[in-house]
Image (tube, grey):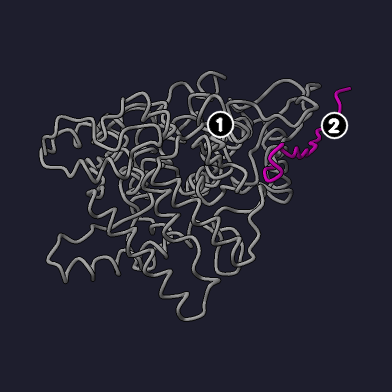
């Protein structure tokens, strides 16, 4: 005698801790069939599964039930892995992130998490195998309408910012294709991205660097005259570091006193983007003088300046943040432009810490430093940015090479510029 019709509901949590899939075991005509219903992201829960079970049992009794194509026909595995055909883009991105996050620095992780948050806000329940070019184009248009980060003026994401999540999606889909979860990578190709206008970042002229340093020193003197010595630090010497050593902003704010060797003229910078994990930046004679004066003043004022103490500190004596540096730089540029306007000089452009990094590269080329050496100082494995700056700097015919040499000369080099005297 055949067994009575019955149906059993099963729930299976996924490894991401946020997804639950629902399955149904149906016994009819002496056979047991396994049916996958869907996930909680697709609206499935125990109540809906019970309704679906009762409907299927009623159809079996009437003889009108047709076995669906999604029938698995086998017992589900005891692990929490989901069948590949039903994997959503949420799970694909989560799997990719688990393998990626240990390969990148903490700051880069923050940027990638921002990208993933945007991607997961757009139809995270979409099956990975169903993502096509149309879906990616709709994602691109949706991203283009998102508000920009850290902006209060209502501006939208720039094309370059829109392309970053799309690039992350393409990387995750590459893995999905390798694992036979997706038939192809629909996010690859230039047509899927927004067109980005070619950006030629600004850099400062040598006299602008000198005025910026002078104004930073005058600002410190002004604060000291107002009996506010705690706010006198981290201006002139920090600007000298950013302009004449070329560090990233995070590398400057994370610098400790023990990272510098003034006798040998070296600055040790931990660099996660360099294969060696650390790079040794050579300090010019001008920058070394500024650093020594900065440390001497800290000692004179009774401030901590040991090997493990921050080289540059805030008014509270704590390590500087990137926001501290950017705010200080904006005010310093404003003060410098006021001084230059009175003299009828060209005003400084909008200046960011990366502007000073490009300025360092230009000063190196005007001082006739070799391209490989400049790349090593900056910490670039890819020469594209460095070569672009070099191409722009090499077109200048009128450059104050005496001022450049005063800023960029090393202690063991002659006082006179080794160039041809042109300019």
Badge number at residue 278? 1
- First of labels 1, 2 by sequence position: 2
User: In the drawing, does residue 105 fall left or right of residue 408?
Assistant: right
Q: Which residue is mark 2?
A: 4
Mark 1: secondary structure: strand
Report if residue 3 lies within the magenta region: yes
Q: Quadrant of the C terminus?
A: top left
Front in this rendered view, residue 274 or 373: 373
Q: What's the magenta region? A: 1-19
Q: Nearer the viewer, residue 118 or 414?
A: 414
Mark 2 neighbour class, 10 Å CA radius: few under 14, some 14 to 19, many 20 or more: few
- From the top left corner, tell me how far across and down residue 382 is, in percent: 38, 26
Q: What x and y, as percent, mark residue 393?
A: 20, 37
Q: Residue furthest front?
A: 415
Position of 49 compared to 186: left or right?
A: right
Q: Which residue occupies 31% across, 38% down?
A: 361
Q: Which residue appears at 60% of the width and 46% of the height?
A: 41
Q: CA distance from mark 1 to mark 2?
A: 71 Å
């Amino acid at each position: 005698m055949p067994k009575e019709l019955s149906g059993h509901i099963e729930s299976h949590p996924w490894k991401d801790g946020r997804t639950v899939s629902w399955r149904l075991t149906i016994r009819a005509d002496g056979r047991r069939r396994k049916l996958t219903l869907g996930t909680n992201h697709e609206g499935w829960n125990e109540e809906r599964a019970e309704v679906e079970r009762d409907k299927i049992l009623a159809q079996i009794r009437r003889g009108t039930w047709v076995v669906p194509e999604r029938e698995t026909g086998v017992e589900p595995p005891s692990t929490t892995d989901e069948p590949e055909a039903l994997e959503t883009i949420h799970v694909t991105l989560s799997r990719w992130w688990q393998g990626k996050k240990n390969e990148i620095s903490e700051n880069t992780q923050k940027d990638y998490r921002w990208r993933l948050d945007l991607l997961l806000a757009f139809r995270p329940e979409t099956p990975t195998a169903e993502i096509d070019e149309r879906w990616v184009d709709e994602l691109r248009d949706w991203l283009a309408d998102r508000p920009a980060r850290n902006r209060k003026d209502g501006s939208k994401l720039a094309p370059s910012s829109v392309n970053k999540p799309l690039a992350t999606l393409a990387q995750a889909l590459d893995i999905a294709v390798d694992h036979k979860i997706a038939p192809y990578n629909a996010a690859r190709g230039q047509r899927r991205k927004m067109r980005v206008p070619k950006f030629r970042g600004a850099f400062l002229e040598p006299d602008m660097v000198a005025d910026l340093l002078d104004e930073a020193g005058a600002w410190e003197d002004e604060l000291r005259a107002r009996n506010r010595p705690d706010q006198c630090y981290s201006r002139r010497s920090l600007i000298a570091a950013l302009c004449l050593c070329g560090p990233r902003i995070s590398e400057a704010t994370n610098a400790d006193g023990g990272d510098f060797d003034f006798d040998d003229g070296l600055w040790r910078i931990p660099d996660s983007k360099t294969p060696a994990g650390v790079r040794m930046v050579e300090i010019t004679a001008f920058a070394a003088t500024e650093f020594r004066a900065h440390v001497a003043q800290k000692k004179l004022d009774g401030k901590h300046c040991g090997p493990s103490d921050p080289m540059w500190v805030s008014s509270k004596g704590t390590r500087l943040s990137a926001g501290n540096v950017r705010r200080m730089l904006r005010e310093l540029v404003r003060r410098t432009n006021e001084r230059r306007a009175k003299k009828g000089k060209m005003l400084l452009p909008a200046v960011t810490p990366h502007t000073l990094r490009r300025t360092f590269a230009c000063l190196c080329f005007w001082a006739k430093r070799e391209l490989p050496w400049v790349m090593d100082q900056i910490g670039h494995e890819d020469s594209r940015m460095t070569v672009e700056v070099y191409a722009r700097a090499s077109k200048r015919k009128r450059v104050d090479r005496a001022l450049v040499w005063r800023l960029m000369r090393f202690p063991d080099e002659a006082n006179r510029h080794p160039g041809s005297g042109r300019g």
